[in-house]
Structure formats: structure tokens, C-alpha cells
Image (cartoon, rainbow, N blue to C red):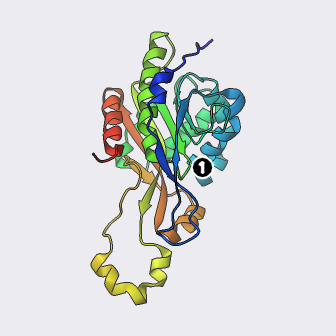
Amino acid sequence: MVKKRVRDPEVLADAPPAQVEGDDSGSDDDVDMVNVEFEWFNFKPDVDFHGLKSLLRQLLDVDSQLFDLSALADLILSQATLGSTVKVDGEDTDAYAFLTILNLHEHREKKVVKDLAQYIAEKSKSSEALAALSSVLASPASQVGLVLAERMINVPSEVAPPMYAMLIDEIEAAVEDKEPYEFTHYLILSKTYNEIESALDQEEAPRTKKSKSQGGKKGRETMRCCSAMRWLRGPSIRGRFQELGIKAQGSLMLIETSRFEGAVKAIGEYLSPPQ
């Protein structure tokens, strides 16, 4: 049986408050900002199932129909001492964000893990950057930790670094307890949002063409995290975001264990507020 590891409450209490954008029903300048105190918790199986399942559906988007999300949520909740939820109104409420890790080798016989591994292998075939992933997944010597993370769209990205830092500590504690979390690689599955020319801007092009050519942004700006590979998931995503000038994509990043802690540190530095 997995031991329960409780985080130090003093560490969590020091997490800084963040501002969350509210509903914007007016102009660009009419945005409600709400100060929110975020709290980090272990997964709570009797509370988190439905909220976690919703966030998994958001993470996988149109591809979520390819997987048994209930089975995936149950698997995540079965290792409640690894990973975090972020909440606002206490432990017994739905999560605003989550982060966890699954050992793809340890759970390789579970159908939902087989489906995820096959899905990832298929996606990686289209990218030279992840050409080695299929062999890594197939090797008996490989212990790949699949990192799954998602947050509600209006939750600031600053909640991520503490979750990753706590994950490193939890993995170290799990390895000390002889649990199967001694990974050779970390594979991060996430979603990215890239800025593109919006459909609305294109409709207004005849009236604004000159000003856009002088002051418009060139290229695409990654709005969340960089990755080794991205892919567009489906037409519903294009229809939902393109008119706002946003392109949503799936993302995969493979990191060797020796580089994972440095990558987490880099995420924290990148997302830290300016001094």
C-alpha cells in the first residue's frame, strides 16, 4: 500500500496570491481582476474525480474521446501522494489545476495507458525531434514518467513552478520508499497556445492593412510553453480560437532525468514576475 505523504503546510501557505481575469463583457480595458489565494493539495479520491476528469478532457480536447477518461482519472487518484491539485476554497472543492506523473512501464498492461502510449508514439512519428521516442518507449530498460498537467484557462501560469518543484520532492521520497518512480526520462504532454492572425482581423484587412503591415506582430509567439513537438488536434479547436487569433496545439517534450530539475528551474525563472 502506498504511504500517505503530507506536504509541509508552512511551505504551501507561503505561496503568493495571484490575479485572475474575470469575465470580460465590455471593452478591452474593462477587465475585472480578482485577487485569489491558491492552495496546493494532494489528490483526494473522494473529491477530485469529476474535476480531474474535466481537466483531462480539456487537456486532450477533441482527442479525449479516444481514451477512457474515467479509468485515467482513477489511475491518477490511486497514487494520491504524487502530484498536486490547485484549489481556491479549500480541499473539498474542485481543482482549478493539476499536475501528476504516471510510470508508463509500470502501468503498461492497463488499457488506458496502452492507448496513451500508442497515441504518443503515433504523434511522435511526424517529428524528427522525437524520432527516438518510439525506441525509448519500447525499451525494457526505460522508465518513462508521463507528466500530465492542465489548468483552467483563466488560472495564471505562475501556479505551475511550485507544482513541478513539489513533484520532484515527492518523486525523491517515493524512490526512498522503494516505489516505482525512478525514471530515466520524463515525457510532458500538454497544450500550447500560439498567437496567429485572427479571423476577425482578416475580415477587417481592407480597412487596416496599412497599419497592420507597419505595427503588426511578425511570426508566432508561444504563449505557454515551448516543446519538442506540436500538432493541431482538430477542426473544433480551429473554429473556437482562430477568430481570437489563437492556435491551440498538442505538445510533447521528452527530457532526460539528468536535465529535468534544471528544466523545472528554468520554468520557474521564466514564469517569475519581473523584479
Image height of 53 relative to 25, above or below: above
Q: What amino acid type is highlighted by mark number 1?
A: Gln
Mark count: 1
Which residue sits furthest bottom?
206
| Pointer 1 local density, CA inside 10 Å: few below 14, some 14–19, many at least 20 | some
Picture layout, residue 26 above or below residue 61: below
Which quadrant is home to the N terminus? top right
Q: Residue at x 45, y 78 (%)?
A: 201
Camera sees residue 141: no
Measuring from the top left, give residue 79's x and y in whole percent: 59, 23
Residue 154, compared with residue 272, is above or below; it is below
- Identify residue for label 1: 58
Q: Could one spot residue 105 in this view of the protein?
A: yes
Q: Judging from the image, what secondary structure is the residue with disc 1 in?
A: helix
Residue 165 falls left or right of residue 106: left
Q: Nearer the viewer, residue 74 or 113?
A: 74
- Quadrant that contains the C terminus: top left
Left or right: residue 86 compared with residue 214: right
The one of 161 and 252 positioned closer to us in this rendering: 161
Q: Measuring from the top left, give residue 18's x and y in whole percent.
A: 46, 45
Q: Give the side of residue 12 with respect to residue 211, left or right.
A: right
Residue 261 location, x and y as percent? 34, 29
Rendered residue at 38%/43% (across/down): 130
Q: In x, y percent, where is residue 241?
A: 53, 65
Q: Residue at x 51, y 67 (%)?
A: 30
User: Is 262 left, or right, of 33 in this rendering?
Assistant: left
